[in-house]
Image (tube, helix red, strand yellow):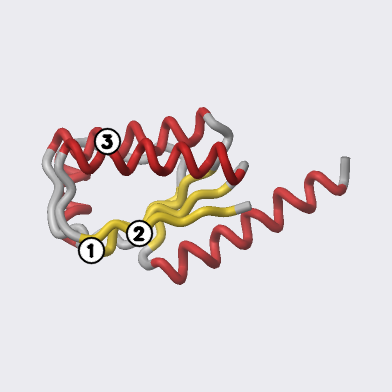
């Protein structure tokens, strides 16, 4: 199972918190193994929001879901790099289509692994 969240417009601390709560709720209710977090419409982030995004990815991982972050603009990527924020072993893909394709690939791997047990 895969779930996807697209974020459009600026993210402030309150919106970041709501995004996290919504995403984690969806992971739990849908028993998602892969999450695509698309931030194509986010024009900028500050250090607090960047850290919150990283914590969201970590929380999803702790719930057993792999997160694929898509749609980083050049400006957002630069801020994340400058702040030293990386998403550890998680996936970052250029666009939503690529993220969905990667999610399908990962789900196929997970399903194949479960069948082989």
Q: Are marks 3 and 2 in contact (CB under 8 Å)?
A: no
Front in this rendered view, residue 6 or 69: 6
Q: Residue at point 24% right, 33% down?
A: 51
Q: Residue at x 45, y 71 (%)?
A: 97
Residue 59 lies, in percent from the top left, at: 43, 31
| Secondary structure type for disc 3 | helix
Circle 3 residue: 17
Left or right, 113 with reference to 83? right
Observer-nearest of 49 and 109: 49
Asked if residue 106 shows in the view, the reply is: yes
**Mark-to-mark CA distance, 3 and 2:** 15 Å
**In terms of depth relative to the viewer, which is nearer, 90 or 24?**
24
Quick one: label 1 or label 3, which is nearer the N terminus? 3
Category of crowding for the residue at label 3, using alpha-carbon neighbours closer than 10 angstroms: few (below 14), some (14–19), many (at least 20):
some
As helix, strand or loop, the secondary structure at mark 1 comes to strand
N-term-proximal mark, 1 vs 2: 2
Asked where in the image residue 17 lies, by quadrant, the reply is: top left
Element under disc 2: strand
Q: Counting other residues with Cα less than 10 Å from the Cα at mark 2, is it few (<14), some (14-19), or many (20 or more)?
A: some
| Residue drawn at (45%, 54%) of the image | 36
Above or below for 12 versus 41: above
* Residue occupied by mark 2: 6
> Are dots 1 and 3 in contact, CB under 8 Å?
no
For the residues bearing labels 1 and 2, Cβ distance under 8 angstroms: yes
Q: Which mark is residue 41?
A: 1
In screen coordinates, is 40 left or right of 111? left
Q: Is residue 65 above or below residue 8?
A: above
Q: Earlier in the sequence, mark 3 or mark 2?
A: 2
- Disc 1 crowd rating (10 Å Cα; few below 14, some 14-19, many 20+) is some
């Amino acid at each position: 199972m895969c779930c996807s969240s697209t974020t459009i417009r600026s993210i402030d601390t309150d919106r970041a918190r709501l995004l996290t709560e919504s995403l984690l709720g969806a992971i739990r209710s849908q028993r998602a193994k892969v999450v695509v977090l698309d931030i194509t419409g986010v024009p900028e982030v500050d250090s607090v929001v960047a850290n919150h995004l990283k914590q969201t990815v970590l929380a999803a991982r702790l719930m057993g879901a792999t997160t694929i972050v898509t749609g980083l603009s050049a400006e957002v990527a630069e801020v994340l790099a400058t702040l030293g924020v990386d998403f550890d072993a998680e996936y970052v893909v250029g666009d939503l289509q690529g993220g969905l394709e990667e999610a399908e690939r990962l789900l196929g791997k997970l399903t194949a692994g479960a069948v082989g047990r």
